[in-house]
Amino acid sequence: MSKVCKFLKENLEFYDNRIVCCGQGIFSDIENAKKYFIGINVDEYKNDFNIDEYLQKREQYIKMFQEAGEDEKNIPEFCQNCNCFAPIDIDDKLETKNFKFKNINISHKTICNCKCVYCCLSDEGNPEKIEILNKQKSYDIFPILKQLQDKNLIGEETKIGIFGGECTLYPQELNEIISLGEKYNCSFEIYSNGIIYNESIEKLMKNNKICLRISMDCGSKKTFKRIKQIDKFDKVIENLKKYGEAAKHNPEASLQLKYIILPRYNDNIQELKKFFEVALSCRAEQVILSINRFWLIRNQLKPIPISIKRIIKYFINNNEVNIIRNIDYNELWSWWVEKALKENWFTEVINSIFHIKKRD
Ligand SMILES: C[S@@+](CC[C@H](N)C(=O)[O-])C[C@H]1O[C@@H](n2cnc3c(N)ncnc32)[C@H](O)[C@@H]1O
Ligand code: SF4
Ligand code: SF4
């Protein structure tokens, strides 16, 4: 059976200037997006998105995979040489009748109340870009979501991802998106910086299938301020505890705290220990290790610093294993892990990453 990329087959992703199947191959350039799917210039946009057009393109690209055989030149141009290709089977007959999107990811707004020094939206906290992002208009996604409903493209198997900017800054819209998802019994994946408490999210934490993922990246007030450039550590801890409390009796809710390794900011064990204390105190169900992708791109050819190796090792051997049940390394980039594998004494540590199981 032929293979196709999972993202192309399963996803619909809304960005500030494009509606596409993934954020990998079809980068933020509007013209590039227009070439393959839908590019959006907000000032000119007339709510003329047509889901049938999108589905036709999706089908056309899947067929290209189907017919490409071993020759990469025949797969869609935007997929060629993509690091994020995630192969899955193409069903023999392209399923279009009962098709539902598996992931609908919403990142159409760029507004935020933080200025994280690593933020991918603002090219690592570039002040000019932050200003633009915070003033940027966006488009109305509800007529599009209505089309998805009318065409039966949302169902129980759909996960609604809400990524941002910062979704708690548009509570009305967030609430409407959540209500729509609830109607179809969808699951949710919501990203937030945790500064503003949101009651619709709290309700999901009590009753629904949801991952709430918060990038903490530290365990102390001082480092929080350095990284996020806002003095809201205590507020975030207070909110995390409330979300953790809300999820207490719901086995399908997962509060997840992320630690993005940021060399020179948080690549020390003292900070990481405090992060684990925070995770425990707010009943986090999962902790996630990630790395600043810009740093990674700049440093991919250099040896991996010892401080980072120590962080990974600490994550693996952390003493809180009985309480923090899941540790996820998925956000460490696979090609970087491959590189790490080539460094001898580190092999053992990285190998064990892939053998880590869910901890009860
Ligand atoms: C752009 S943020 C928007 C959601 C929300 N404001 C937040 O910070 O969680 C989406 C995700 O991208 C992650 N992210 C942003 N910049 C990154 C970078 N340079 N490297 C790795 N992850 C990054 C954030 O940690 C967050 O989990
Ligand atoms: S191969 Fe890359 S560009 Fe193509 S759909 Fe998958 S993630 Fe997107
Ligand atoms: S909170 Fe999220 S969107 Fe805001 S600056 Fe930080 S990473 Fe970027």
Image (cartoon, helix red, strand yellow):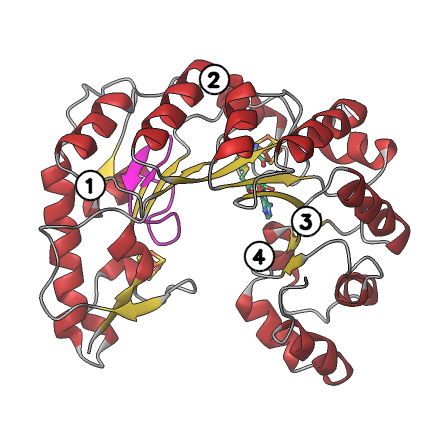
Give the residue type at disc 3: Ile
* Residue at 81 percent of width and 53 percent of height: 267
Q: Label 3 CB, ligand 1: below 8 Å? A: yes
* Residue at 58 percent of width and 76 percent of height: 338
Instruction: Say which label, 1 or 4, has the lower sequence index.
Output: 1
Front tag of 3 and 2: 2
Q: Name the residue under label 4.
A: 331
Q: In which quarter of the image is residue 235?
A: top right
Label annotation for residue 113: none
Distance of mark 1 from mark 4, alpha carbons? 28 Å
Label annotation for residue 260: 3
* Residue at 57 percent of width and 21 percent of height: 198
Instruction: Work out which residue is located at the far front of the displayed protein and give it.
Output: 249
Q: Is 38 placed left or right of 304 in the picture?
A: left
* Residue 76 place in picture, x, y as percent: 21, 61
Vertical placement of 317 versus 154: above or below? below
Instruction: Say which label, 3 or 2, has the lower sequence index.
Output: 2
For the magenta stretch, what is the residue range? 13-29
Instruction: Say which label, 4 or 2, has the lower sequence index.
Output: 2
Q: Are marks 4 and 2 in contact (CB under 8 Å)?
A: no
Q: Do the residues labelled 3 and 4 touch (CB within 8 Å)?
A: yes
Front tag of 1 and 4: 1
Q: Mark 1 points at which residue?
A: 153
Distance of mark 4 from mark 2, alpha carbons? 27 Å
Instruction: Work out which residue is located at the far right of the displayed protein and give it.
Output: 270
* Residue 61 place in picture, x, y as percent: 17, 58
Give the secondary structure at mark 1: loop
- Magenta run includes residue 205: no
Query: What is the quadrant of the N terminus in the image?
Result: bottom left
Q: In which quarter of the image is residue 307?
A: bottom right
Give the secondary structure at mark 4: loop
Q: Mark 2 points at which residue?
A: 170
